[in-house]
Amino acid sequence: METNVRVKEAMSTPLIVIEPKATSEAVAKKMAENNIGSIIVTKNGNNAGIVTERDICYKVVANRLDPTKTLAQDIMSTNLVTIPSNKTITDAAKLMVNKGIRRLAVFEDEKIKGILTASDILSVSPRTIEILRELYEIYSNPEESLKVQSEEISEGGTCDECATFTDNLIKVDGRYLCDDCREELED
């Protein structure tokens, strides 16, 4: 279930950045103004880290820190997970699941050019939700995922045999099939 859609086609641009000395309040305002859930922290044009809405919630609000005094550099994550812009969104989805994250910094020509979120991937390729679901099952419960031979996908999707969209897909031998195609296999 591979897709040829490249990360650069799905990533969010332009890249929104903020300085490390910006307050958490300024970070939150900039995210709200741009309707984004994360912001890259840059120092002298170099990427220093990322602040997400979770960082503000968990590190500032939950700890009752003053958002007008808590700086971006105090709450940012410096282990920025990146992906090249020419990789596929399937590669990106697998990396997100493997790392347990919801966004990736996208680089091209050795510079961060944008952010790719799980929502960006799903908006381009709804079938990727099946990949994310499978990978989540594998990484969160590897023993159980090996036992599962057939599973229903209640959100719907496209049949791997006839390419018809349906609300009822069942995974059979590694392929998602609609009711009609499953019946043909059983006959």
Image (cartoon, rainbow, N blue to C red):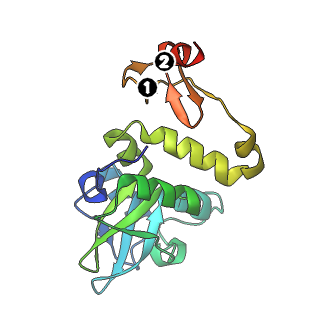
**Residue type (three-letter) at the residue carrying disc 2:** Cys
Q: Circle 1 — which element?
A: loop
Kindly identify which numbered label has been placed on residue 159: 1
Query: Could you tell me which quadrant the C terminus lies in?
Result: top right
Give the quarter of the image for residue 183.
top right
Q: Give the vertical position of 79 relative to 142 (above or below).
A: below
Residue 60: x percent and y percent?
57, 63
Residue 17: x percent and y percent?
31, 69
Assess whether mark 1 and mark 2 are in contact (beta carbons under 8 angstroms).
yes
Residue 100, visible in the rendered structure: no
Q: Nearer the viewer, residue 140 or 183?
A: 183
Residue that mark 2 sits on = 181
Q: Give the vertical position of 124 relative to 117 (above or below).
A: above
Q: Circle 2 — which element?
A: helix
Extreme bottom residue here? 44
Q: Nearer the viewer, mark 2 or mark 1?
A: 2
